[in-house]
Amino acid sequence: MGRIPCCEKDNVKRGQWTPEEDNKLSSYIAQHGTRNWRLIPKNAGLQRCGKSCRLRWTNYLRPDLKHGEFSESEEQTIVKLHSVVGNRQWSLIAAQLPGRTDNDVKNHWNTKLKKKLSGMGIDPVTHKPFSHLMAEIATTLRPPQVAHLAEAALGCFKDEMLHLLTKKRIDFVGPATPAISGDPRVAYNADANVNDDKEDTIQKIKMGLSRAIMQEPNNDKAWTMMGPTGEPSDGLAGMCDMYPAAGDGFRYGGTAYGNDGEGSAWSQSLCTGSTCTGGAADQHGSGTHEKGEDDDGEEAEGGKAARKGDTSMFGSDCVLWDLSDDLMNPIV
DNA sequence: AAACCCAGCAACCGCTATGGG
DNA sequence: ACCCATAGCGGTTGCTGGGTT
């Protein structure tokens, strides 16, 4: 037996609400409150399901709702909380944003923020760099299994990458050299990226991954948490610290990412894998904690070494994360 | 000008939690 | 303790309008 429907679907209207319907619902609720949603449409003279009325009210008609653009600080809050609670607690995130609904937050995340992070080469699920995830796969597994698993993992963010590579130009701040072609983020640094062939791109990604697989594990240069001006953050375990950024461009850690000269001027240090939930934990697997960070959140040798800037990805003015040299070097 | 594509958003679906009888 | 109605929630769908070809 199936679930009992919340209402007779044949007798209810669906789809977009008209202003007249909104008025009826709003005025009814203003007089009688929101008790018993099942009775509300009948009493208010609406051909709608009670559930539909409730959603319309909670997501759109409630007088305390904000309907404008999300502010910088609201975006910061969403990213910060998402890095901790993941996709499972939209209502919790929305509760921290007065006037925003979970639906608002979810939509904004799916349409804007996810792409912003992807555009920065950061996996929006784990809040870690794509390259780092690849490196994790490469260094925690051995062939032949690694080849299959790596392929599968690659598929997870291949579409995102291809979208960025073929649809959107992203101008990163930093040296303009496309020398490190093994890293996917560099592929769309060049002006000529629009001409990149999709298959060629996939091939490059695969080559970088294959090369990493062939190397010994080298996690001691794992990416590290940095403050807004490049100084190391305290690296609070279990929390991703947000830093207000000076200057333009989308910032994540100490690196500014311009987005055609405009974009959010906010920043975030990188979230440690230990705090990510949901799919993040699944992808990391157990026992893959960063060598650059101890279990209690303190940085170990690798993190300290990375902060010296010797292997910074984009140059001295933009320290973000450090990776195995093998992933950074050009594929010969 | 028409066709097509795509991003954004409102609304819906279906599952789970909760509370009352 | 159980059942049922309702509310809450996250995931997904599909419409719409703007931009591009």
Image (spheres, coloured by chain):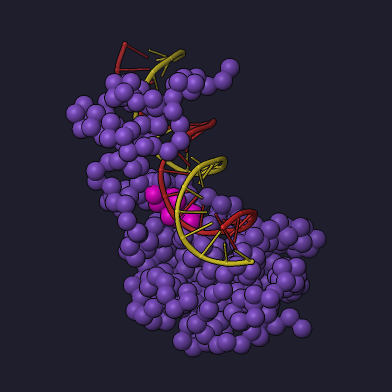
Chain colours: A purple, B red, C yellow
What quarter of the picture does the N terminus of chain A occupy?
Answer: top right
The stretch drawn in magenta includes residue A327: no
Question: Which quarter of the figure has residue A149?
Answer: bottom right
Place of residue A330 in the rendered image (x, y in percent of width and height, measured from the top left):
70, 83
Residue A82: in sight, yes or no?
yes
Residue A296: in sight, yes or no?
no
Place of residue A304 in the rendered image (x, y in percent of width and height, measured from the top left):
49, 80
Identify the residue shown where x is 64% and y is 57%.
A156
- A171 left or right of A85? right
- A150 left or right of A172? right
- A62 left or right of A155? left
> In the image, which residues are magenta?
A104-111
Identify the residue shown where x is 42% and y is 75%.
A262
Identify the residue shown where x is 40% and y is 32%.
A52
What quarter of the picture does the C terminus of chain A occupy?
Answer: bottom right
Reply above or below: A227 against C20.
below
User: In terms of secondary structure, what is the magenta stretch mainly?
Assistant: helix
Question: Which quarter of the figure has residue A164?
Answer: bottom right
Reply above or below: A38 against A251.
above
